[in-house]
Amino acid sequence: MSRASSHALKHPPVTAPSEPAGATTSFPELAVAIERERRRGRGAQSNASGRFEAEARVAFDDGWQSLDELPPFKTTVALDTARKVITRNDSPDIGFDRSINPYRGCEHGCVYCFARPTHAFLGLSPGLDFESKLFAKPDAPLLLEKELAAPDYEPRMIAIGTNTDPYQPIERERKIMRGILEVLDRASHPVGIVTKSALVTRDIDILSRMARRNLAKVAISVTTLDAKLARTMEPRASTPSKRLEALRQLSEAGIPTTVMVAPVIPALNDSEIERILDAAAHAGVKEASYVLLRLPLEVRDLFREWLMANFPDRYRHVFTLIRDMRGGRDYDSQWGTRMKGTGPMAWMIGRRFEIACEKLGLNKRRSKLTTDHFARPKRSGQQLSLF
């Protein structure tokens, strides 16, 4: 029997690394990192309890080296029995008011993912739990069809992939995203997809059919062209070359594509902006966008742990630049500036992006989706019209 212990604390006794030069506020204590072999292939370094939990639990060795007996983190999938699948928002700085997330949690394990804090609402950790304890919504296609059939439903573009990736590895077997696309195709309803997975090419048959009616567009995030950095930062996402190839296939199929340089991390991948845009343009992409690194809630400390573990020599410099672009803070959630930041460094990144796009002929025209073809699905038991 294992002698490993779990100790419940209000404040785990751990030491934070030194702060960046010029810091005005202190960092909270870091969570205890999980042993490397147990989290192999994962992005987060730790698995701290969610912020809504009454106690924080930290595993510690009682002297018998029994932590070595703990098994590695394995991906588990539970069912999410949601009653509705379309989520609404009224955020003034994003271009959609509704979205669908076929899954909760994401096995891609991107350490910077701004969606990680949502796992705290489930009583789970935004750390390793977020990328290993997943939730699937198998009824999503049926629920969507029911919501589209409602008499008071007004069609507007549905965004998919705004929280967790709809084409993460478990989609290969579960095919929930494909079922959703089949419903949208039958209803002639517009959809915009964001992903960093080459699996999206599996659905080119549906997407190209929808694109001919101005009903579909796809954005793929390319964070870096460095395969080693990508594997460290996004351990289970498609490689950069696979993403570029996916952009090429989608473009050749007539599907409007966008490359997202997201997130831009100062002193880590910001030097690659022009190279990423150039590679995407050669793949046939016509539109591009970028988003500055966002570190809300638990994401900040998870990113700090990852940075200290993988790039300790850049830690102070990266966070100094982040604060320069966030008004002296680690994160600024204010509408209108949270995506791009403020200050000279943020301005320079924006100008570099704009100049590169202009040189490559990107963003000359923006693809627009239409709701003109929308055909409300027939509700169960509804009599068919004679005309």
Image (spheres, rainbow, N blue to C red):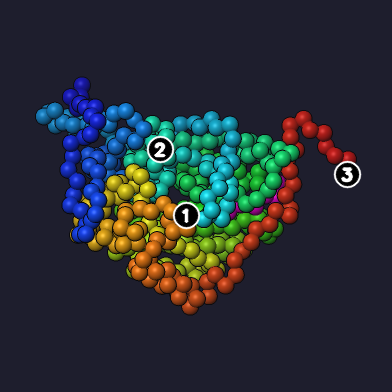
Secondary structure state at the residue bearing disc 3: loop
Q: Amino acid at mark 1?
A: Trp
The residue that disc 2 covers is 119
Q: Name the quadrant of the N terminus.
A: top left
Query: At 52% from the left edge and 43% from the top edge, which residue is drawn?
Result: 101
Relative to 70, does residue 291 appear above or below in the rendering?
Answer: below
Relative to 339, does residue 140 appear above or below in the rendering?
Answer: above
Secondary structure state at the residue bearing disc 1: loop
Q: Are marks 1 and 2 in contact (CB under 8 Å)?
A: no
Residue 66 counted in the magenta span: no
Query: Closer to the camera: disc 3 or disc 1?
Result: 1
Q: Amino acid at mark 3?
A: Phe
| Residue 144 visible in the picture | yes
Residue 375 spot, x, y in % from top left: 74, 47
Depth check, front residue: 6 or 253: 6
Q: Is residue 222 left or right of residue 23?
A: right
Q: Which mark is residue 335?
A: 1
| Residue 268 visible in the picture | no
Secondary structure state at the residue bearing disc 2: helix
Q: Is residue 217 left or right of residue 259?
A: right
Residue 152 spot, x, y in % from top left: 72, 40
User: Between marks 3 and 1, how big is the CA–CA gap?
Assistant: 48 Å
Q: Name the quadrant of the C terminus.
A: top right
Relative to 137, does residue 178 appear above or below in the rendering?
Answer: below
The residue that disc 3 covers is 387
Residue 162 spot, x, y in % from top left: 50, 49
Query: At 66% from the left edge and 38% from the top edge, which residue is drawn?
Result: 147
